[in-house]
Amino acid sequence: MRRSSPLGPLVALAFANSAADAALLPLLPAIRRDLGLTALQTGAILSTTTLAMLATALPIGLLVGRVGARLLLLAAALLIPLSLAVQAAAPGLPALLAGRLAFGVSFGIVWVVGPARAMADGRGAAGTGRLIAVSGAGWLVGPVLAGVLADAVGWRATFAALAVATAPVAALVALDRAPAASLAAARLRDAFAAVRHDRSAGGATLVSALLGVVTGVTGLLAPLVLAANGLSAGAIGVAVGVSAAVWTAAAAVAGRVGPARTNVHALGVGAAALATAWLLPAISLSTAVVVGFLVVSAACRSSIGTLVYAVGAHGASGEASAAASVGVMNLAWGVAALVSPLAAGAADSEAGVRTAFAAVALLALALALWLLAPRRRTPAPA
């Protein structure tokens, strides 16, 4: 029997990836100001990372069964500091976008290979719960650290410091001596067939798309609204950090949900709660309301994210098959997260921003109703 693979190196990689990703948010207002960017161009900074996820989600899911998870995770660990260094030295928007593309490839590897490995050996949602929780810890540390550094030394030096801080993770991943599983290559058409014909896989994929919309719109509009309300980069970082602490706690709780309750109905309840949270900034854009929205939304997103991979890959026959299923879910996430910041970036007034938040709330509510609707039973043949 193969020994259960330890998650330590994967957890460290997920933390570094999430901290570096979240660090961008408090820096966005300063980047926009210094480079003279429009709201649409600022949205493109977020969308570029997602574009890389979109382009790589399916290939990565298939590569797991061919080259193994360890090599892919090492590539992700090397790309994180490299991409941060490129962003630190970027003279303008094109170079900055190139750095974000490189980071997006790393992001794609971590969040396709990572959940599949975390769920392996019977861990299920308990494994993904650890991954989601540590990503929340990254979102707690990253924005606070980046915001404080940006106020003191500027956003370029902040990216450089993050590059140095994340570099040792590659050594940790390279030294991982966990036994490699013998993986059969997965077939992409099997993963797509499951989405079409299996309610759990299809529902999880739709929920992944919703999480993509939520990620894209939150990442763009929340820091810009808080900056417009007079908050500094450091204060924005603290606000994001508080929501990340709630994210981590919610993931730890959701990770305790048993397999019998890890299902489409649980995702529907989470989507309904998420819809309620998104109504808050649709009503008011005051600082207190927006910070409260970040906290409540983080709890909902974390809980859903902990369960969605286990629900979507419940029929997978192994780690490679699970990675292919996760790749399809992340493809849906990537499409939504790519388009949503560009659409939200067109909101150039308070009324437009509130409308964007309301639209996401309605989308989440519609999906929740579909997920919670009673399943029609096929009558048994006479």
Image (tube, rainbow, N blue to C red):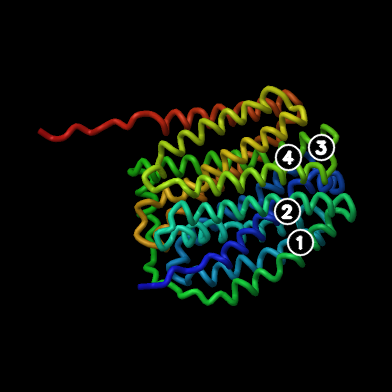
Secondary structure state at the residue bearing disc 1: helix
Name the residue beneath numbered marker 3. 227
- Pair 2/3: label in front: 2
Task: Relative to 374, say whether 250 is above or below.
Answer: below
Name the residue beneath numbered marker 1. 162
Q: CA distance from mark 2 to mark 1?
A: 9 Å
Question: Tag on residue 40?
Answer: 4
The amino acid type of the residue labelled 1 equals Leu
Q: CA distance from mark 2 to mark 3?
A: 18 Å
Task: Please state the horizontal and vertical placement of residue 141, each as a whole percent of the image.
Answer: 72, 53
The amino acid type of the residue labelled 2 equals Gly
Task: Please state the horizontal and vertical placement of residue 168, each as a whole percent of the image.
Answer: 69, 71
Name the residue beneath numbered marker 2. 142
Task: Please state the horizontal and vertical placement of residue 207, each as a whole percent of the image.
Answer: 49, 40
Q: Which residue appears at 55% of the width and 58% of the height?
A: 56
Q: Are marks 1 and 3 in contact (CB under 8 Å)?
A: no
Q: Are marks 2 and 1 in contact (CB under 8 Å)?
A: yes
Secondary structure state at the residue bearing disc 2: helix
Q: Are marks 2 and 3 in contact (CB under 8 Å)?
A: no
Q: Could you classify mark 4 by the number of other residues whose Cα lies within 10 Å: few (under 14), some (14-19), or many (20 or more)?
A: some
Task: Relative to 266, say whether 193 is above or below.
Answer: below
Observer able to see residue 105: no
First in residue order: circle 2 vs circle 3: 2
Secondary structure state at the residue bearing disc 3: helix
Q: Could you classify mark 3 by the number of other residues whose Cα lies within 10 Å: few (under 14), some (14-19), or many (20 or more)?
A: some
The amino acid type of the residue labelled 4 equals Leu
First in residue order: circle 1 vs circle 3: 1
